[in-house]
Amino acid sequence: MTDYEVTYILRPSLEENEVEERANAISEIVKNQRGEVVSVEKLGKKRLAYEINDVREGHYVVMQFKSDGAGSKELERLLKLHEDVLRALVVKLDAKMIAHMAAVAAAAPPAPTPVY
């Protein structure tokens, strides 16, 4: 299996629970293609670099997954057909990028503990 990362933008009109549902549905697509979801990170609503069909912002989601080539192509095809996905980009991660991402995650400062 090969490591991939997909970044997709969902319509801004979706509520947070709907964004969660769409992200889970897209994760299920990977699982149905005999893939494995490594992580899903919702980055929130952000302004787009340029308008897409008169839309100026969207909900960004980044998902890392492992799959074969056919599974990633099928995910890419289904994302293009999904009505709530404005744009999607699937990239293949090489060993150098995976090592870099692990180093960045290890160097990240620990989350602050809440003060009561």
Image (spheres, rainbow, N blue to C red):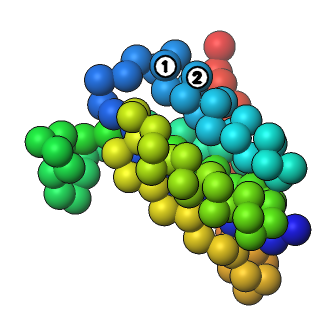
The residue located at (56%, 57%) in the rendering is 76
Amino acid type at mark 1? Glu
Residue 26's tag is: none
Q: Is residue 108 above or below residue 112?
A: below
- Of 25 and 115, nearer the camera is 25
Left or right relative to 26: residue 39 = right
Q: Position of residue 53 (x, y in %)?
A: 17, 45
The residue located at (24%, 46%) in the rendering is 47
Label 2 and label 1: CA atoms lie apart by: 5 Å
Location of residue 115 (image quadrant) = top right
Amino acid type at mark 2? Glu
The residue located at (66%, 74%) in the rendering is 92
Whether label 2 touches label 1, CB < 8 Å: yes
Residue bearing mark 2 = 21
Q: Position of residue 51 (x, y in %)?
A: 16, 51
Q: Position of residue 85 (x, y in %)?
A: 41, 41
